[in-house]
Image: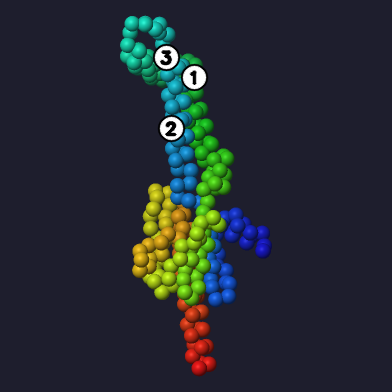
Amino acid sequence: MTISEFKKHWLDGEPRIEWDGDSVRVKAAHRLPSSGYEQRIALWLIACFLAVYMVITEYGPDMASDPEANYLLEIAAFITVALSNAFEALAEVARGGPPEHLRGWMFALSCIGGAFVFLNFGPFSLYTWLTNREHVTIIVNDDQVSVRHSVLRFPKRIAREAVEDVLILRNHRTGHDVMIQHEGGLTRLASVHGDLTRPTLIKSCVERALYAGRSIRIESDRIGSSRI
């Protein structure tokens, strides 16, 4: 195997077809549609919380706590005054005031910018690429279609004659499902993160494997009938 084939099939996980006697094997590896979605939302919420916290602590007033006052009302008043001071500092800088008034805003923007860099250019992408991948093996022979999504899972088997079509359905806001339509319903082949490029490749490979399996069966029937 060349370096380009290793990168294409093992690192990128591009779908490939392998011939094994009378059966056809389709292998693919890809990121799941929900890859990093929940973690991304959680990190953005943490970054926004830290940004608001920085603004409130920087522009918050010095208030003495009154033991007899309502604690929740004191907190609400403190936050309201802090936000008012923060926007007043922006107005002061816009009127030509010193840029030191923007210190709290710069701290808040550093939290947002740090989250953006981490989520788009750093180890987060490597983490989702390594931990949220699906390895699919589809075996097509004369009798059945077998789908296995990992080594530890039992394969799903469908009668070859029951297969009607291969479909691509929108499953998640960031991905698609490749499905086999058969007499008993729908069976998932792969859930792929991204646009339609990778699902279309998997669909075309599965269709080629189904057509090749049918061709093998027809050819074997012809050979048997000629011998008779």
Q: Which mark is residue 45?
A: 2
Residue 151 position within the rendered picture, expressed as x and y whole percent measured from the top left? 55, 57
Q: Residue at x 54, y 40 (%)?
A: 124
Residue beneath disc 1:
103
- Give the Cα separation between the discs numbered 3 and 1: 13 Å
Residue drawn at point x = 53 percent, y = 36 percent: 117
Where does the image place residue 166, in percent across and percent down from the top left?
Answer: 41, 66
Residue density around tag 2, few if under 14, some if 14–19, many if 20 or more, within 10 Å: some
Q: Looking at the image, do the residues carrying marks 1 and 2 touch, with CB atoms under 8 Å apart? A: no
Above or below, comparing residue 51 to residue 132 in the picture: above
How crowded pointer 1 is (Cα within 10 Å; few <14, some 14-19, many 20+) is rated as some
- Helix, strand or loop at disc 2? helix
Tell me, yes or no, if residue 93 can be seen here. no
98 vs 122, left or right, is left
Is 20 positioned to the left or the right of 104 in the image? right
> 22 or 194: which is nearer to us?
22
Q: Quadrant of residue 170?
A: bottom left
Q: Is residue 108 above or below residue 152?
A: above
